Structures are given as structure tokens and as C-alpha cells.
Image (spheres, grey):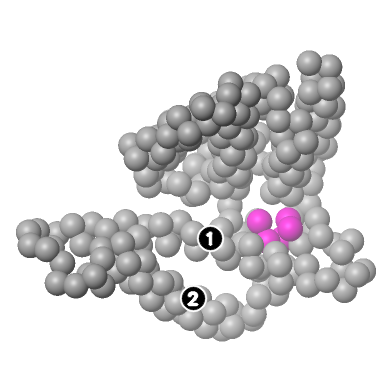
Amino acid sequence: MSTVLLRRVPGDTVIHRLWAGTKLLAVLAVSLLLMFLPTWPVLGMITAVLVFTAVAARVPLGALPRLPWWFWFLMSLGIVVNAPIGLEAVVRYLQITVFAFLLLFASMMIAWTTPMNEIAPAISTLGAPLRKLRLPVDEWAVAVALCLRSLPLLIEEMRVLRAARQLRPKGGRPQNARDNGLIDIVTAAMAVAMRRAGELGEAITARGGTGQLTAYESRPGRSDAVALVLIAVVSVAGVVMGIAL
């Protein structure tokens, strides 16, 4: 898997300078469009838009995750399982698969082009109307931001633990049923994650609490207005294509 998964790719393009809230709204629009109209024309249009955005943001090919062979084997197995049902089942399975990949790619575009410290303020700003309903918007924003920031660290920790286990002497059978490599790695990763969570909580408290994570001033600009108009145009075009074709 790529070492830059969910980490910002250096750059100073227009995509990088967009407000984080604009990118979140774009992903929301893509999600809703694909959820209600997952047709091939719409899937193709969204794919073209995302590829163009990645090229405009100058995202290198090395940023893409390298999925293992068994993942593609399982994906192919899904086609084999749906084949006896009929061609329509296979086509529907492929549409759902492409839908999932597009949502994942759109989410990774945010991580590649946006500093993580801008995510929480953007979510807090977008969720401002919900404060009238006395909903904990700031707490939700902080939780999402901390999850996004900690996920790359957890992935890297899993890689280190897996590499360390591979250095152990090979040969021999497990002593008992509990001697399972995957369980050992997951257990160690959970222990490390809890330790890091405690240290992170202490650091946040020492710096004034979680309110500091959403205090960062972030507002949309002119380029964001243009981007939102383009998002609206693409959404309308997708609806027309999904209904007409």
C-alpha cells in the first residue's frame, strides 16, 4: 500500500487552495448523485471529472494505494458468484464496485489536497445551522478530524507490526489455536492506538482543549464560488444523463 495514503501531496494548485468545505460539499454531491443514479453514463462522467481533478492537482501515481493480489481475486470471485444469477446481476455488481471505488477516490482527493487542520473548522462551519437544534457540531467535527489524522498513523503502525512479525524465525506449527498472526497484529495495533489516543488527549488538553481544533479561521473565497457552480453544473448534468439514458 502506498506510503502517502491519506496524506497531503505537496502542491500549490487551484485544487490545493480551495476551502476544505468546498471539497466536502463536492464529495457529498458525488455521493448523492451516485447513490440515486448509479448508471454507467453517470459513473463515466464522475470518473472523468475525478481524473481531471487529480491531474489538475498534480497528484502523482505513487499516491494511489497498491492493493494486494487477493483483493482483486475476491473482486473477481464476486463476478463468478453473480454469473449464475444472470447478466443483470453481474452488471449491477460491477456498478456497485465502481461506485465504491469512485467514493473512495473522491475521499482520498480531499486527503491529498487538504491539510488535516482545515477539516474540523470546515465541518464546524458547514454544520453551523445545526447548532440551532443544539446538536454537538463542534464535537463531531473534532471526532472526524482526529480520525482522519490518526488513520495514516494506524496504517503505518500496522505495517511496522507486520514487518516485525515477518522477521520472526519461520518453521514449525503454532503451539495452539490462539497462536494466530492476524490476531496478534490486531491486538498490538489496538494497544498502540489506545496509547497514542491517551497521549493525544493529554496534548490537546495541554493546548487548551478541543475547541482549538475548530478555532482555525476558514472561509470560502472566489475560487470556491466558481468550484461550487461547477459542482452544481456537473450534478445537474448527471441527473439529466441518469434520467434520459
Q: Residue 176: where, in percent of width, then height? A: 19, 72
Residue bearing mark 1: 149
Looking at the rendered structure, the kind of residue marked 1 is Arg
Q: Locate the C terminus by quadrant.
A: top right
Q: Residue at x 20, y 62 (%)?
A: 165
Of callouts 1 and 2, the N-terminal one: 1
Query: Is 32 covered by the magenta stretch?
Result: no
Q: Quadrant of residue 67?
A: top left
The answer to whether 2 appears left or right of 21 in the picture is left
Q: Quadrant of residue 68?
A: top left
Q: Which residues make up the magenta segment?
A: 119-123
Q: Residue at x 58, y 24 (%)?
A: 86
Q: Residue at x 67, y 72 (%)?
A: 212
Q: Residue 111: where, in percent of width, then height? A: 56, 47
As rendered, which of 96 and 6 lies closer to the eye? Answer: 96
Q: Residue at x 60, y 28 (%)?
A: 89
Q: Residue 157: where, in percent of width, then height? A: 35, 62
Q: Is residue 133 above or below residue 120?
A: below
Residue bearing mark 2: 197
Q: Is residue 160 visible?
A: no
Give the spatial CA distance, label 1 vs label 2.
Answer: 12 Å
Q: Is residue 122 above or below residue 38?
A: below
Asked if disc 1 and disc 2 are in contact, CB closer than 8 Å, the reply is: no
Q: Residue 225: where, in percent of width, then height? A: 82, 37
CA neighbours of label 2 inside 10 A, class few (<14), some (14 to 19), many (20+): some
Residue that sits furthest to the top in the current view: 245
The answer to whether 88 appears left or right of 201 in the picture is right
Query: Is 121 covered by the magenta stretch?
Result: yes
- The circle on residue 162 is none
